[in-house]
Amino acid sequence: MAATNDSDDLEALFDSIAATSTVPSPVQVAPAPAQVPVHKGVSLEVGDNDELQELFDSLCVANSGAPGATVGEQDLIAKLGDQDSDSWPKQEVVFNQIGQMARSLHDTICGLGYDKLLEKTVSAIPDAKDRLAYVANLTEQAACRVLNATDVAVPIVDKLVDSTNTIADRWDLLFDNRLSVAEFKLLAEDTRRFLRQEIPQHTAVVHAQLTEIMMAQDFQDLTGQVIKKIGILTQELEGGLMKVLLQVVPETKRTEEVESLMNGPVINAEGRSDVVVNQEQVDDLLESLGF
Amino acid sequence: MAADPKMRFLVVDDFSTMRRIVRNLLKELGFTNVDEAEDGAIALQKLQSGGFEFVVTDWNMPNMDGLTLLQTIRSTPNLRHLPVLMITAEAKKENIIAAAQAGASGYIVKPFTAGTLSEKLTKIFEKMGKV
């Protein structure tokens, strides 16, 4: 473990906090706690935070009764319900506790080797977000292309059906002996034109739209790859975070389920009795309830 | 289908693709008088302005979800008679029960087929005819 690095990071963090404080005479931040050893399995007792403690104490002292406190700080004062700016016992306790919690968490995470996991998470999540946005984008484009194609093709097919019916009706008349020779000649010409011109022309357009629909499926290859990558990443993160959680979360909290009515599609219904998997089951359920 | 082909539908879904699909399917079934809304809040505004006879809605939407829309419709005197068909990816039994209890006229789980939509519409029209 890079123990000294960790301490340096921590120190830098506190330095920055001290620097942003608007106290008129800047606090002299305690010298580097770089010597504080952070070892694997380091004890998390309050006692090993002496230097941090000093740091926080100095911050608190510097802030106490500060006439130059910012609006934000005054808000904080008001919120904490301590109007007396000369004594800050409550704030001090809070600062100390937060400091100790942050330190404990930091030490725990480093001690367990999860700092690398978190680092990875911090960089991987935005990347995964971008990738998912890419998937959403491609699939939406594909859906639009397909719908546009059907918008073009459907009216053409409808027109072909209409034309076919009209010509068929006229042929029915002929077979009923209700057409004159002249009408029959016209019908023969119209039919020929229909077969030679209209049908090839229209089916070519429909064919092109079907090709367009086929080509719109090219997103699947790209999204498939991206989704697989995100799947692997998620699995890794889940595994790591689960270990952290299992160590931190108390036993009693472990079985709590989040109840919600907005869960989206059921990805895997296997072994679940609380979901339906098809329309039949929806209908059966509603029927069994008398709806 | 026995229903009036001029019947005015409102299709509510936050995804334009799904709205287009439902609109196209309704057209196939002979209903060309279709308007769209992208969430429950917009749907409610459109419904309040009047003229609609049928609502097809998704569940999970921003601003106002489909269940809230359904509940609001059922508690609004001039809208409560409207048939509301839910088309949603929510497939938990408690969702279906909640929708039924809130007064949904039908419940279709995504992904669905043109046949299912047609069947549910017919069923709803039959019930409406009996009332």
Image (cartoon, helix red, strand yellow):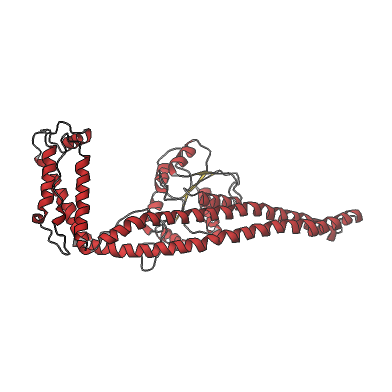
Q: Quadrant of the C terminus of chain A?
A: bottom left
Horizontally, residue A276 falls left or right of residue A120, namely: right
Q: Position of residue A96 (x, y in %)?
A: 13, 47
Q: Position of residue A287 (x, y in %)?
A: 43, 59
Horizontally, residue B81 falls left or right of residue A80, namely: right
Q: How many marks?
A: 0
Can see residue B84?
no
Q: Is residue A64 above or below residue A192?
A: above
Q: Quadrant of residue B90?
A: bottom left
Residue extending farthest to the right is A181
Say which residue appears at 28% left-offset and 58% top-offset.
A118
Q: Position of residue B10 (x, y in %)?
A: 51, 44
Horizontally, residue B66 falls left or right of residue A6, namely: right
Q: Quadrant of the N terminus of chain A?
A: bottom left
Can see residue B22?
yes
Horizontally, residue A3 falls left or right of residue B52, namely: left
Residue extending farthest to the top is A67
Q: Nearer the viewer, residue A61 or B111?
A: A61
Q: Nearer the viewer, residue B101 or B27?
A: B27
Say which residue appears at 46% left-offset and 48% top-offset.
B14
Q: Nearer the viewer, residue A46 or A190?
A: A46
Q: Nearer the viewer, residue B58 or A215?
A: A215
Q: Position of residue A63 (x, y in %)?
A: 14, 37
